[in-house]
């Protein structure tokens, strides 16, 4: 069958659209259908979706079937009808007819579009070798089949492999280096058992609202809430104590807290000897790092540090929720590891409501081989660093690993022309005439506008998939709720059609999404897809003992590592501190660039997503820089001033907002705003760096020295 012959149903669909589960149509014919939020947010909320008819949805609500979601979702997904039925949705394949980036396209058929992509990939590979093709994707959908299926094509075709670094690399490395696996204590314990909740380096009011549900339940019970964040976020406003550190200095804070814990008898030596690798060495080391030392680095007062350390030390049921935000610095892995070390010093892990969580994804028994084609991996093929897209596309030898240039790309679920660091280089690269780019998207994003071929994609309510979570422990299967508009196709279908044309052979290309899910679940020993869907998700909670590592940390000696083997992650590991410390490799301020900029997530944008919805644009108003009022006064800036913010990599224009609660010298620009919303036509990531964090890469979005001045 030619691809154009099935106008909506993806190839090989193994089931019908989701029936109105667990609910009957009301008089108006509205049914409530279960689904799961696919967005790149650790909450992975269980949803109840109002289906108005086979093509339209109404309100989206948080489901009660999942007690982490507990009926609460963020405002942007509650209003999903605004996004899924947006008039600007792509519904037809497009071919570029104007210059790159000009947004001039003409409609073509699916057959022609896919034929062109395949011809180009074959021609480029013939000329430069297969590594010249670089499939590029990220987590616009967190559904595992739709997101990661592109890897199967990549491996079978021996295209350049993908080293994913934009989000979790530094945080994962730092956490796992100590704990041994990406899992931890369950946030649901917080509700009834925690006496102290520390939200470290994250702003869940914006980025994962469900953490707040549980933290506020604890607070209502009398627990203390501490927030460690460079500015007074919506989350910090809810806190009893806000520690407004300088960005990139959490390691220093954690080390000074440990100094006090050891010095004042809060360290649990029975626990330390049984469960940790080098407690004596750690104690001797942190004895050299008093609060005065950390005060000079973090900008906090000695009193703030000591009071927090005592509070943490005397509260056994203390829960640290480690977020990604504080890992997005060159030293982010060291900082994450230092914070994770705190719970091992006091032995908070032994208590219900105690311990820490960074993420749970390492806990699922899922075997990903069929999805990703791991049986076809050729380790001799280079992998390219996602975050170093700018240097890669502009021919940086080292970033290209001395190999062929990238001359063809297939992009799914990501909008690098907005979200990647060193945007000037990214745009320059995408504008290259010798680069062939195919973007499969839901909207004509800024990345899609550089493409030669644009393909229209389904949204999560229009295809099947399954989801792990990071913030909770459920594994959830979803079915399409409505039919896609126009000629939108799911990722799996596109990959499978390209595979046919490219001669890529793998069983996965001949199966439906449902069949891939079912087989994957079976070989993983999990519930089959239908059962999972019927029951509303399978909970993989490991139980108190294991989730708190009371049966040992997942290392051969079962001990938490205060002395990580950083070198195991890459040669630069040898440059890192042996024990928790302030690793001073950050982009420190200079006389020319006296401010440290944090480019934090906005509440109603989700990365690049939702920037197309009117209500989000309205709420976020315009690109803004938040500055300490004293800095504003010293420079004569007032609310609303147009200011140039810049450094050696790039510059742009933002508007001034004086804001109390952050240190002098620290500035915040929430986003990610589209480039077109800046009067210069280039956004904040023109300033952020593509330098890899230590030891083995990871983007450093919040580690940027900048100047701020009136535009010339
Ligand atoms: N509304 C909304 N939701 C989102 C996103 C979004 O863009 N918008 N993004 C999604 C994605 S992709 C992710 S990965 C998650 C991330 O979500 P989380 O893991 O929860 O982390 P963030 O909330 O991104 O962390 C941002 C906060 O970290 C703070 N921060 C920055 N640098 C430092 C530092 O050096 N030290 C400390 N202590 N704090 C620091 C910032 O000031 C900011 O308040 O959120 C997801 N959810
Ligand atoms: N300044 C600054 N920059 C940042 C960050 C920051 O904090 N500050 N955070 C960084 C982080 S943590 C991340 S994860 C990145 C993420 O940035 P992006 O990768 O751009 O993430 P999203 O906006 O989640 O998704 C991108 C696109 O996926 C598309 N999409 C969604 N579902 C599907 C699908 O099923 N099929 C197809 N084909 N497309 C789909 C959406 O339409 C959307 O345009 O941004 C990074 N950039
Ligand atoms: S909080 Fe996160 S997972 Fe939940 S609905 Fe919003 S974006 Fe989706
Ligand atoms: Mo992310």
Image (tube, rainbow, N blue to C red):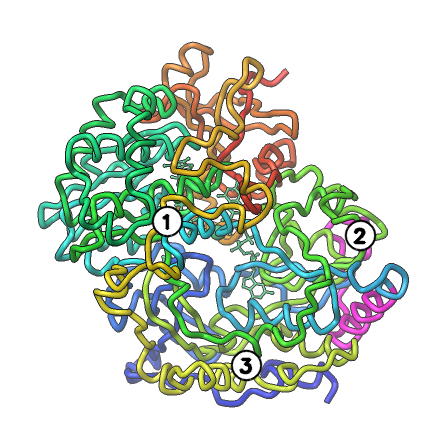
Q: Residue at x 36, y 25 (%)?
A: 298
Give x and y (percent) for residue 703: 51, 33
- In reply to whether residue 282 is colored magenta, the answer given is no
| Earlier-in-chain disc, 1 versus 2 | 2
Pointer 2: what residue?
403
- How many marks are shown on the rendered structure? 3
Element type at mark 2 = loop
Q: Answer with left or right where residue 692 lies relative to residue 478.
A: right
Pointer 1: what residue?
561
Nearer to me, 198 or 32:
198
Which corner quadrant of the image does residue 665 belong to?
top left
Asked if residue 144 is positioned above or below residue 522 in the image, the reply reads above
Quadrant of the snapshot with the N terminus: bottom right
Pointer 3: what residue?
513
Q: Answer with left or right where residue 432 lies relative to residue 69.
A: right
Q: Nearer the viewer, mark 1 or mark 2?
A: 1
Give x and y (percent) for residue 332: 46, 40
C-alpha gap between disc 3 and disc 1:
40 Å
Which corner quadrant of the image does residue 53 belong to?
bottom left
Answer whether labels 3 and 1 touch (C-beta < 8 Å). no
Element type at mark 3 = helix
- In reply to whether residue 98 is colored magenta, the answer given is yes
| Whether residue 470 can be seen here | no
Element type at mark 1 = loop
> Which residue range is magenta in the image?
96-123
Q: Residue at x 57, y 28 (%)?
A: 653
| Whether residue 535 can be seen here | yes
Quadrant of the snapshot with the C terminus: top right
Q: Nearer the viewer, mark 2 or mark 3?
A: 2
Graded by Cα atoms within 10 Å as few (under 14), some (14 to 19) or many (20 or more), the crowding at tag 1 reads many
C-alpha gap between disc 2 and disc 3:
35 Å
Q: Nearer the viewer, mark 3 or mark 1?
A: 1
């Amino acid at each position: 069958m030619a691809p154009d012959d099935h106008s909506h149903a993806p190839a090989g669909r193994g089931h019908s659209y989701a029936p109105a589960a667990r609910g009957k149509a009301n008089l108006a014919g509205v049914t409530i259908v279960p689904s799961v939020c696919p967005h790149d947010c650790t909450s992975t909320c269980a949803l109840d979706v109002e289906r108005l008819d086979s093509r339209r949805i109404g309100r989206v609500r948080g489901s009660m079937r999942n007690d982490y979601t507990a009926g609460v979702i963020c405002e942007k997904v509650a209003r999903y009808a605004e996004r899924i039925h947006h008039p600007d949705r792509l519904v037809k394949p497009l071919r570029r007819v104007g210059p790159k980036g000009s947004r001039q396209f003409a409609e073509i058929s699916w057959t022609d579009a896919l034929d062109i992509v395949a011809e180009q990939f074959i021609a480029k590979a013939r000329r430069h070798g297969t590594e010249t093709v670089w499939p590029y994707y990220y987590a616009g959908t967190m559904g595992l089949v739709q997101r990661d299926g592109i890897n199967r094509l990549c491996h079978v075709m021996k295209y350049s492999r993908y080293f994913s670094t934009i989000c979790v690399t530094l945080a994962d490395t730092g956490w796992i280096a100590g704990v041994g696996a990406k899992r931890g204590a369950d946030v649901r314990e917080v509700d009834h058992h925690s006496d102290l909740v520390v939200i470290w380096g994250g702003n869940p009011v914006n980025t994962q609202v469900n953490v707040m549900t549980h933290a506020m339940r604890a607070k209502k019970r009398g627990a203390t809430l501490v927030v460690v964040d460079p500015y007074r976020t919506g989350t910090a406003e809810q806190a009893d104590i806000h520690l407004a550190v300088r960005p990139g200095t959490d390691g220093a804070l954690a080390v000074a807290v440990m100094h006090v814990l050891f010095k004042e008898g809060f360290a649990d030596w029975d626990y330390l000897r049984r469960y940790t690798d080098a407690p004596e060495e750690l104690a001797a080391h942190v004895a050299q790092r008093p609060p005065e030392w950390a005060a000079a680095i973090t900008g906090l007062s000695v009193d703030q540090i000591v009071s927090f350390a005592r509070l943490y030390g005397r509260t056994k049921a203390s829960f640290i929720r480690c977020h990604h935000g504080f890992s997005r610095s060159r030293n982010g892995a060291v900082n994450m590891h230092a914070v994770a070390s705190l719970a091992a010093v006091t032995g908070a892990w032994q208590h219900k409501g105690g311990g820490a969580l960074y993420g749970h994804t390492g806990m699922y028994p899922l075997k990903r081989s069929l999805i990703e084609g791991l049986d076809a991996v050729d380790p001799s093929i280079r992998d390219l660093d996602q975050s170093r897209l700018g240097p890669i596309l502009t021919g940086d030898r080292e970033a290209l690993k001395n190999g062929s240039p990238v001359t063809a790309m297939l992009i799914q679920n990501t909008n690098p022309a907005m979200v990647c660091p060193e945007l000037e280089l990214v745009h320059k690269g995408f504008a290259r005439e010798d680069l062939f780019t195919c973007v499969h998207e839901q909207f004509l994003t800024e990345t899609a506008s550089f493409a030669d071929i644009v393909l229209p994609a389904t949204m999560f309510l229009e295809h099947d998939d399954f989801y792990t979570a990071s913030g909770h422990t459920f594994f959830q299967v979803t079915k399409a709720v409505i039919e896609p508009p126009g000629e939108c196709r799911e990722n799996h279908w596109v990959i499978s059609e390209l595979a046919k044309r490219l001669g890529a052979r793998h069983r996965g290309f001949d199966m439906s999404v449902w069949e891939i899910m079912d087989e994957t679940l079976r070989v993983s020993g999990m519930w089959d897809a239908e059962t999972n869907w019927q029951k509303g998700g399978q909970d993989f909670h490991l139980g108190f003992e294991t989730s708190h590592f009371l049966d040992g940390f997942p290392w051969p000696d079962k001990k938490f590592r205060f002395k990580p083997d950083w070198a195991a992650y890459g040669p630069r590991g040898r440059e890192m501190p042996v024990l928790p410390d302030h690793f001073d490799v950050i982009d420190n301020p200079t006389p020319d660039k006296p401010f440290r900029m944090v480019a934090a997530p906005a509440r109603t944008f989700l990365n690049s997503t939702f920037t197309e919805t009117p209500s989000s644009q309205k709420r976020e108003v315009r690109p803004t820089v938040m500055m300490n009022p004293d800095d504003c006064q010293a420079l004569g800036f007032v609310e609303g001033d147009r200011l140039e913010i810049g450094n050696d990599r790039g510059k742009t224009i933002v508007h001034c907002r004086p804001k109390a609660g952050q240190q002098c010298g620290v500035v915040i620009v929430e986003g990610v705003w589209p480039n077109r919303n800046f009067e210069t036509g280039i956004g904040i990531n023109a300033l952020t760096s593509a330098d890899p964090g230590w030891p083995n890469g990871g983007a450093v979005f919040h580690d940027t020295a900048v100047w701020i001045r009136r535009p010339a």
